[in-house]
Every structure is written in C-alpha cells, then in structure tokens.
Image (tube, grey):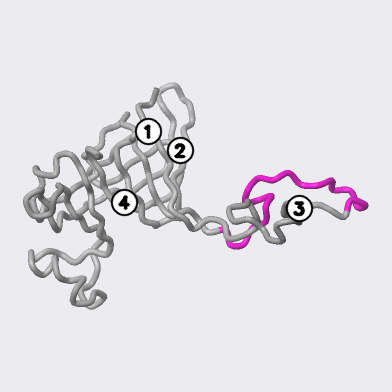
Amino acid sequence: MISKAILGKKLGMTQIFNETGEALPVTLIEAGPCLVIQKKTVENDGYTAIKVGYEDIKERTLNKPEKGEFVKNQLKFKRYIKEFKIKDAAKYNVGDEIKADIFQPGEKVDVTGISKGKGFAGGVKRWNFNRGPMGHGSMYHRRPGSGGATDPARVFKGNKRPGHMGAEKTTVQNLEIVKVIPEKNILVVKGSVPGAKKSLLFIKNTVKSGK
C-alpha cells in the first residue's frame, strides 16, 4: 500500500544546474490539485481508499452516471478519476484537496503514464535486434529473420516480432524530486517520464528502497 500519491500532467523537459554547477535533465510535472470525491472504509467497502478527481471539466461533457458523486457532494466536475489505496486514507475527507506539497525535495517517486505511440515498428527498432550486413550484396538488412522450426507449421505466440510499438502503460521507478514549487503545484523530477506533453501521469512514493 502506498503512503502518498497524486495525479498530474507532464509539462515538458528542461535542465537545471545544481550547487556544483552540474547540469541535470529534469521533467516538469503539474501535480494536482486533486479533489477527494469519495472515501472508502472497511465497514462499507471492505478496504480503505480514497477516490480523487483531477482537472476541471464542464458539466455538459459528462453523462448522468458520471456526474453522480460530484452532484451528491456538490463538488466541481473533474475529467480524470482514480482510486488511491493509501495508508492514511482515514485522514482525508470528501472535498479535501491533495496538492504537490505532499512531496519534498529528495524524495523518490514512481511515475506511471502512457508511453508515446511509435506506430508499426520492425524488430530492430521495437526489440533492439541486430541488423544484417549493410553491403549492397547482402540483400538482408533489417528483416526479422527465421520464424523458428518448420515442423509446427505455425509461429508460436509471444515471439518478438514486428508490430505496434508504444502507446502502453509504462512506469519509470525511483526518480528523485529535485524541487517542489507549491504555489504553482509543480514537481521538478530528475530524468524523463513516460508520455507526451500534457499527458496524464500518476505519481506515488517509490516501491524501491534506493539501495
């Protein structure tokens, strides 16, 4: 179970300089504010969690079931909704906001998002296969090669073949938070995170010890 989490949006990458003058590649993430729209308890649901919403949206874009929790609790309508199974869910109440200041510089986080779509890709790009000789007489440069033994008369599932690349759920673990700008709800994270600019991200405390 996680101890802290938030939804955010990727703003882009840049670089900053630390105290020693070293250039650090960083990603800027607009983290929150997230609105608590439902609180789950052991008595009612069998487990503890909170459901949060992120990014304001107009009422006319939602259907009646989607409006349910917002109308019931007289809350602003949100575009993205996600459930957080966090340890201290009991301290949150419906209507509370979760902001970027729950994190501090130096903390490590895991960031989950949808990776950039690459379309149809061959084995060299998709799986880092070696290519053939590039001489004109080779006649074999970037093709996938043998599909295996001829006796089964089919290609087994799970083989690394050319196909659709990217546009899938990806997590980058153990990223360090370099800076927090609470007045703008921005996290400055060292390194790169999945997805294109303005794509949705899920940020939580890392599951790794960092050793």
- C-alpha separation, residue under disc 3 versus residue under disc 2: 38 Å
- C-alpha separation, residue under disc 4 versus residue under disc 3: 44 Å
Which circle, 3 or 1, is nearer the viewer?
Answer: 3
Q: Nearer the viewer, residue 147 or 75?
A: 147
For numbered disc 3, what is the local secondary structure?
A: loop
Q: Which mark is residue 146?
A: 3
**Main SS, magenta residues:** loop
Q: Amino acid at mark 1?
A: Glu
- C-alpha separation, residue under disc 1 versus residue under disc 2: 8 Å
Label 3 neighbour load within 10 Å: few <14, some 14-19, many 20+: few
- C-alpha separation, residue under disc 2 versus residue under disc 4: 16 Å
Can you see residue 178?
no
Q: Is residue 106 above or below residue 46?
A: above
The tag earlier along the polypeptide, 3 or 1, is: 3
For numbered disc 2, what is the local secondary structure?
A: loop
Please say if the residues under marks 1 and 2 sit with CB atoms less than 8 Å apart. Answer: yes
- C-alpha separation, residue under disc 3 versus residue under disc 1: 43 Å
Quarter holding the C terminus? top left
**Magenta segment includes 24:** no
- C-alpha separation, residue under disc 4 versus residue under disc 1: 16 Å
Q: Residue furthest right?
A: 137
Please say if the residues under marks 3 and 2 sit with CB atoms less than 8 Å apart. Answer: no
The tag earlier along the polypeptide, 1 or 2, is: 1
Q: Amino acid at mark 3?
A: Ser
Q: Which residue is mark 2?
A: 191
Q: Which residue is mark 1?
A: 176
x and y percentages locating residue 91 in the rendered image: 9, 42
Label 1 neighbour load within 10 Å: few <14, some 14-19, many 20+: some
Q: Nearer the viewer, residue 36 or 188?
A: 36
Q: Which residue is mark 4?
A: 8
Q: Which residues are magenta?
A: 118-138
